[in-house]
Amino acid sequence: MQINDVQTLWDQQPTPRPQQTATEIVQRSRRRSAINAVAMLAFFLLSMAMAGHTFWFSFGSQGEALGIALIRCSLFVILAGVQYPLWRQARREADRRESCQLAPGDCLREIQVDLEREIASFSPLRSSVPLLLIMVFISLNKWIDYRLGVDTLAECIGIVIAAGGVFGLVGVTFWHYRTQFLEPRRSHIRQTLAELGTAKR
Amino acid sequence: MSQEFLEKYTALCWKIARAFVDSPDDQQDLVQELFITLWQAMPRMEKGGKESTFVYRVALNRAITWQRRRQTYARYLDAFRREPRVSATDDSPEQLKQLYAAIRRLSDLDRSLVLMHLDHLSYREIARVLNLTESNVGARLTRLRKKLADDVAGD
């Protein structure tokens, strides 16, 4: 095929008709935002439900139960508070990459900087700290329930062992994430950037 | 989003989607993503800026990111997919399919470059979108046009 034939073939391709209306596409976008909002709300309600559970079913005095419920609420708020800025930062970076300010070359460089930073700071142990906090928090809750007479010692120990197991499992997952996902992506981006660098020269 | 907006960018979105992904189902998904991204990005367009370069830059960046995420998820999702998917069909001419297949085999940068060139953007506009020099765009295009013509003829 001649070079000019490629251009002719391209120019003569049929223009497809839109398969969905503008309203349907906008609705899809809004539905996606709504699902995110529902997920956040579900997380919040779950937190409240756990706090409420302590309040209504504990056998201590009402004041004691209210105190424990407040501690549980605060811990969830702190955990959400730690996660939220990280989530916002990730969103901002994604928005910047997809915005009009970046060319694909810059986009890759930006991703590379993010990745290098992520890999440098990514320690499976350090990344597991929020989870460790949750596990400690669950164990603490069980211990409180044991002290209040809600649970037996065996139940309390069982939960702590299960929490430790989950923590170990997630640690292994983080390690897998680093070796199977982050590092291959870095080498691919480095290779592409090397190609880009050659192109610039 | 108005119907005029949709019709104005339909051809562009489909071309980019076909150049980035093979499966017609994935192409439809990507087209929707591109529409939503363009619609949301339009208010950010600089006054006096050229619409074609803005639209290409936004759409190509989105397609690259979408494809990267899709590849990550696909690795896990495909392992669970037992039933063949009911796919949309592609009834375009065989040579056009070969051309798109050849474009898909290019790197992200080369693919973006070829798409804009085939859509008649000038070297200056392409250089602005991809942050390359005009001479570099010219040199790469000379090689790519030859490669595409050979690939389509050879498939």
Image: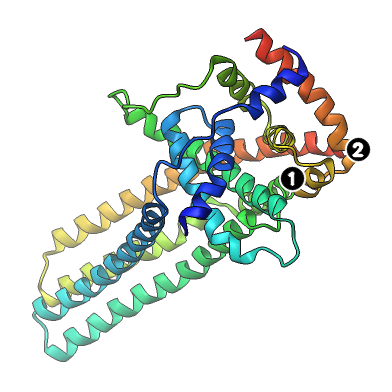
Q: Are marks 2 and 1 in contact (CB under 8 Å)?
A: no
The kind of secondary structure element at disc 1 is helix
Q: Is residue B41 left or right of residue A55?
A: right
Q: Nearer the viewer, residue A94 or A12?
A: A12
| Label 2 to label 1: alpha-carbon separation | 17 Å
Residue A84 position, x and y percent, is: 46, 69
Residue underneath mark 2: B135
Q: Residues within 10 Å of mark 1 (few under 14, many from 20)?
A: many
The kind of secondary structure element at disc 2 is helix
Instruction: Give the letter of the chain under mark 1.
Output: A
Residue lying at the far top in this picture: please name it: B154
Q: Is residue A8 left or right of residue B64?
A: right
Q: Nearer the viewer, residue A71 or A195?
A: A195
Residue B97 position, x and y percent, is: 55, 20
Residue at point 64%, 54% (across, down): A97
Residue underneath mark 1: A105
